[in-house]
Amino acid sequence: MASIWVSRPDLEDLIGPEAALALLTAFPGRRIYIPAKATSEKFTDIVGSVANEILSNEFRGYEVCLPNVVKPVTLKEKILPLLEAGLSLDDVARQCECTVRYVCMVRADMTFRRKPAPKPRRRAEREA
């Protein structure tokens, strides 16, 4: 059995954006086998009969590797709201199962980004 990887834009061009999103939501980052039978209706419930027929004609007998549409939540994205809610560093580290040191680094990065823009220097300071 041969395997082929299909990107999301290629899949959208092939079966349409709605059907592609439905297929990628049902099988995110997984491999699906497209049966060799042209009459197979394996994915009709998910993508509809027309898109299923297109998939069958295009990838008949192939194992298709699909991209992952679900973006995993990073540890930093978990920490930021907890810090903004006012939890202590220890509580945040305990909830996120990380070190206090990492929480401090995220907090420092958060405060660094929120600093106001520096004031322009005066002409005398630039020439000195």
Image (cartoon, grey):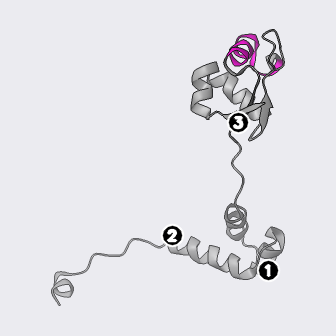
Q: Is residue 107 above or below residue 79?
A: below
Quadrant housing residue 54: top right
Q: Is residue 78 above or below residue 125?
A: above
Residue type pointed to by label 3:
Leu
Q: Which mark is residue 90?
A: 1
- Label 3 to label 1, Cα distance in Å? 40 Å
Nearest to viewer (mark 2 / mark 3): 3
Side of 82 where 94 appears, left or right: right
Q: Is residue 81 above or below residue 37?
A: below
Q: Which mark is residue 66?
A: 3
- Label 2 to label 3, Cα distance in Å? 36 Å
Quadrant housing residue 15: top right
The residue under label 2 is 113
Q: Seen from this angle, which residue lies furthest bottom?
A: 128
Q: Position of residue 67 (x, y in %)?
A: 68, 39
Residue type pointed to by label 1:
Asp
Q: Position of residue 36 (x, y in %)?
A: 79, 17
Quadrant housing residue 13: top right
Q: Residue at x 15, y 86 (%)?
A: 127
Magenta-drawn stretch, dominant element (helix, strand or loop): helix
User: In this picture, which residue range is highlighted in magenta?
Assistant: 45-57
Instruction: Give the crowd class for mark 2: few <14, some 14-19, many >=20 residues within 10 Å.
Output: few
